[in-house]
C-alpha cells in the first residue's frame, strides 16, 4: 500500500483499514517522468489522481504559445480537470510532471463506486470539493485585488514547498506577472 497515501488518508479521512484497501483496490498506479505530458489540451481527462510523490503543473497554452499556469500539485494533493472528467469534454489544460512523479489513479466509474459504497469516503470527497472551491475563490480574489508583491508573498506563504522546486518564469506565470516584475520584487526583498 502506498505509504504517503495511507498516512494522508488516515489523517484526512476516517477510513477503516478495509475501506482504505477498497479505495486502493479500485485504483491504478503510474509513474510519470519529469517533463512527461499526462494530459494534453483537447484530450478528455479520464482519471482523477492523488500525487504520491513529485510535482505536477496544470497549464494552458494560448494560440500564440503563451503559457498560463493554473496550479501546481505537489505530493499529497489531488488533481483532476473536473469539467473534462465529469462531462467527457475536451480539456482546456495540459498537465505535465515537473519532477519524476508517482500517482494513484481512479476512473470516474471507480470513484463513483467508492463514494456510493463508503460513506466516510463520500464525506471526504465532499470536503475536498469544498476546499477546492474555497481555494479557487481565494485565487480569484488574489488575482483581482492583490499587488504583484502581495501575490508573491502569498505564494511563498501558501506554497513554501513548491516555491523552491519551480523555475522563476513558472512562478511568474502562475502569479500573472512578468518575469521582470518578479525579478524586481525578489531583488527589492533581498535589499531589505
Image (cartoon, rainbow, N blue to C red):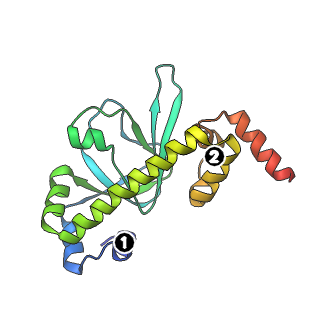
User: At 86% from the left edge and 54% from the top edge, which residue is drawn?
Assistant: 192
Farthest right residue? Answer: 191
User: At 82% from the left edge and 46% from the top edge, which residue is drawn?
Assistant: 188
Q: Is residue 69 above or below residue 55?
A: above
Residue 46 quadrant: top left
**Callout 2: 10 Å neighbours few (<14), some, many (20+)?**
many
The one of 1 and 127 positioned closer to us in this rendering: 127
Disc on res. 151: 2
Residue bearing the label numbered 1 = 12
Task: Tell me residue 93's x, y (percent).
Answer: 39, 35
The one of 105 and 186 positioned closer to us in this rendering: 186
Task: Tell me residue 38's x, y (percent).
Answer: 36, 43
Regarding mark 1 in the picture, which secondary structure is present there?
helix
User: Which callout, 2 or 1, points to the residue nearer the camera?
Assistant: 2
Q: Position of 28 compared to 53: left or right?
A: left
User: At 72% from the left edge and 36% from the top edge, which residue is drawn?
Assistant: 181
**Distance between the alpha carbons at the discs numbered 2 and 1:** 28 Å
Pick the quarter of the image with the N terminus. Answer: bottom left
* Residue 1 visible in this rendered orientation of the protein: yes
Do the numbered discs 2 and 1 sit on residues whose CB atoms are within 8 Å?
A: no
* Residue 174 visible in this rendered orientation of the protein: no
N-term mark: 2 or 1: 1
Task: Tell me residue 131's x, y (percent).
Answer: 40, 58
Q: Is residue 147 above or below residue 61?
A: below
Farthest top residue? Answer: 64
Q: Is residue 104 above or below residue 40?
A: below
Task: Tell me residue 152's x, y (percent).
Answer: 66, 47
The one of 99 and 137 positioned closer to us in this rendering: 137
Amino acid at each position: 500500500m502506498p505509504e504517503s497515501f495511507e498516512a494522508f488518508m488516515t489523517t484526512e479521512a476516517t477510513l477503516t483499514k478495509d475501506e482504505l484497501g477498497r479505495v486502493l483496490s479500485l485504483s491504478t498506479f503510474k509513474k510519470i517522468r519529469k517533463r512527461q505530458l499526462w494530459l494534453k489540451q483537447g484530450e478528455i481527462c479520464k482519471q482523477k489522481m492523488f500525487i504520491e510523490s513529485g510535482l505536477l503543473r496544470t497549464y494552458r497554452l494560448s494560440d500564440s504559445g503563451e503559457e498560463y499556469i493554473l496550479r501546481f500539485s505537489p505530493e499529497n494533493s489531488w488533481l483532476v480537470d473536473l469539467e473534462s472528467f465529469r462531462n467527457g469534454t475536451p480539456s482546456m489544460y495540459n498537465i505535465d510532471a515537473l519532477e519524476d512523479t508517482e500517482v494513484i489513479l481512479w476512473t470516474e466509474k471507480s470513484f463513483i463506486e467508492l463514494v456510493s459504497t463508503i460513506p466516510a469516503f463520500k464525506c471526504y470527497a465532499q470536503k475536498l470539493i469544498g476546499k477546492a472551491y474555497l481555494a479557487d475563490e481565494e485565487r480569484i480574489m488574489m488575482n483581482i485585488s492583490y499587488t504583484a508583491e502581495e501575490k508573491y508573498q502569498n505564494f511563498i506563504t501558501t506554497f513554501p514547498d513548491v516555491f523552491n522546486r519551480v523555475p522563476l518564469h513558472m512562478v511568474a506565470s502562475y502569479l500573472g506577472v512578468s518575469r521582470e516584475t518578479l525579478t524586481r520584487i525578489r531583488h527589492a526583498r533581498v535589499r531589505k
